[in-house]
Amino acid sequence: MSSRVSIAGVDTAKLPKLSGKDMEELMIKVKLGDENAREQFIIANLRLVLSVVHRFCGKGGRADDMFQVGCVGLLKAIDNFDNSLNVKFSTYAVPMIVGEIRRYLRDNSSVRVSRSLRDIAYKALQAKEELSKNSFEEPTIEQIASKIDMPVKNVTFALDAISDTLSLNDPVYTDGADTIHLLDQIADTKNTDENIFENLSIKDAIKTLSPREREILMMRYYVGKTQTEVSQEIGISQAQVSRLEKNALKVIKEFLI
């Protein structure tokens, strides 16, 4: 697709590039009912649709069809966008364009999902879209289930059944030379700065222990052996293992305070 110039009858090489300020000014006119400005705004954002379509290459859909479906998502985004909020249009539009393309791919997928599950999933997606109109925060699965009066587990199962498998390296949005991948949007709640410094402190504390104490802690907390197993392996009594372990933990605790 990267070598194509025309897609769905649109010459992509001739699509205009407008600055963020120009986009904002056009959107103001669009919201005032200026049809000419609306047409200009649509054309100016076809590159955005194209960048999303690139993401779905090789997933079973024809590029021309996905582009047209993505344009439907673009129109919905224009109609529902609130320019009084401090949010870039592209940030709001991309999920809606993605949603339309996903829906198209689901409907044309060779993997068949039961009609009842599809009905629940589509109701949930409609509810999600309605809830999103009133808030820029992602609605929770509980809110969606409550809106369509369905058990949470049923909604979750239905949405999982129609969802596509994604790679963490899939691009979410491309703006010039900068590409945002799915992996970039996943928070790392484990390796936080606080945990990193805490782990470094623990390592420093362990260095102050005797070789025997370090050996016991390694066998107890990394290998998972019992005190009895440790005592048999290193040739001392369980009472001695217990005493050395408690002393080592006390040293580490005092080091961290």
Image (cartoon, helix red, strand yellow):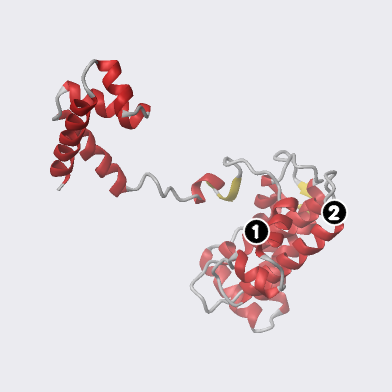
In this picture, residue 93 sits left or right of residue 221? right
Residue at position x 53%, y 79% in the image:
84
Q: Position of residue 157 (x, y in %)?
A: 71, 55
| Residue 71 drawn at (x, y percent) | 74, 61
Q: CA distance from mark 2 to mark 1?
A: 44 Å
User: Which numbered dot is residue 229?
Assistant: none
Q: Quadrant of residue 253?
A: top left
As helix, strand or loop, the secondary structure at mark 1 comes to loop
Tell me what residue is drawn at x 67 percent, y 63 percent: 96
Q: Pinpoint residue 92: horizontal percent, then vertical percent.
A: 59, 65
Q: Which residue is drawn at the image coordinates 51% and 51% (left, top)?
A: 185
Q: Quick one: which residue is furthest to the bottom in this view?
A: 32
Pick whichever, 203 or 176, lies toward us. Answer: 203
User: Which residue is more in the foreground, 15 or 204?
Assistant: 204
**In the figure, is residue 78 to the left or right of 65?**
left
Quarter of image, res 151:
bottom right
Looking at numbered disc 1 in the image, what kind of residue is underneath it? Pro
Q: Looking at the image, which is closer to me, 172 or 32?
A: 172
Q: Nearer the viewer, mark 2 or mark 1?
A: 2
Q: Amino acid at mark 2?
A: Ser
Q: Which residue is mark 2?
A: 114
- The relative height of residue 19 versus residue 111 in the rendered view (above or below) is below
Q: Secondary structure at mark 2?
A: loop
Image-based side of 18 in relation to 126, left or right: left
Q: Which residue is mark 1?
A: 16
